[in-house]
Amino acid sequence: TVALIITGLGSIAYIQANLTTLLVEGVIGQSLRRRRMNKRIHALKGHVVVAGAGSTGKHVLEELIKTKTPFVVIDRSQDLLDRLSQDLMNGEMLYVLGDATDDHALIAAGVEHARGVIAALTYDKDNLFVTLSARSINPRARIISKVVETEAEKKLIKAGATGVVNPTMIGGQRLASELIRPEVNEFLDQMLRDRERTLRLEEVLIPVGSSLVGQALKDTPIRQKTRLLVLAIRGNDRSFAYNPDPGIVLEAGSTLIVMGETDGIVKLRELVGAQAEISGTGKPMHTS
């Protein structure tokens, strides 16, 4: 009888302990994690909101992570978000569970304070809704949308998209490029897939008041401090100066097109005095 009593009490205590653990780590733990994540999202400014974490959105997230760009992703699948969070960022990815076409989900992702929005949903009509909503909430954001049907490009631009990307067209051009210029494609692939170094082509705006304004390119410490290669400079007249002359004088509002490691790009943005801002007020752009 004593043995049965002890065994019974022990079994009940064991079951209660496990149930308590499941409750704390499950419901309560998830609630606490969700609350902490919301606080981190609300503190963000100048980040990127990604609508859709599917086959296209996943590659968007990978690139944002490699370039150290803060972002919040919106998707309707909790399992997908948890898996991507664990695989890409060891469980630290910021996300919103919900429908990206809903204004509430965009607001929860901090779209009003975002510098850019990427609409990477499956259907054009959904990307159109995201574009309309995001533009109405944040008129200054740069909005890039995926497009499947060519006829939808003009509608997305009218809805407020800064640029559209047609994956099918890009795929076709890449197929032809692989045949015509294989070495160039190999170079670009190696640059993007190098696991030891993250090499990228990047743009850096020279703001008003920067210490580089008025200096000749050859007199700036860009090469020594960042080890970046300046490929081109886009002036205020929107024209590009390719392979710029070392004597060219840098102006406020001009943009440096550079190639190098992401750490060097971060140093360059610190060197010019401010992070480059992405504005959605410029001329719409088609990316194919």
Image (spheres, grey):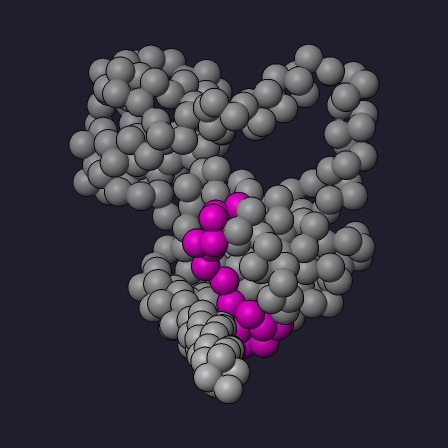
Q: Taking 119 as reference, is 201 above or below it?
A: above
> Where residue 144 appears, x then y in whole percent?
58, 53
> Where residue 190 appears, x then y in whole percent?
59, 20
State the residue in front, 287 or 175: 175
Numbered disc total: 0
Q: Is residue 190 visible?
A: yes
> Where residue 196 appears, x then y in whole percent?
47, 22
Q: Taking 118 as reference, is 67 above or below it?
A: above
Residue 143 sits inside the magenta stretch: no
State the residue in front, 273 or 4: 4
State the residue in front, 195 or 226: 195
Q: Taking 163 as reference, is 44 above or below it?
A: below
Residue 89 sits inside the magenta stretch: yes
State the residue in front, 273 or 158: 273
Q: Quadrant of residue 82?
A: bottom right
Q: Taking 66 as reference, is 58 above or below it?
A: below
Q: Which residues are magenta?
A: 88-108
> Where residue 107 appears, x then y in whole percent?
46, 73
Residue at 72% over, 46% down: 166
The answer to whether residue 159 is left or right of residue 64 is right
Residue at 61% over, 17% down: 187
Residue at 81% over, 25% down: 176
Position of the C terminus by quadrant? top right
The answer to whether residue 4 is left or right of residue 234 is right
Q: Is residue 252 visible?
A: no
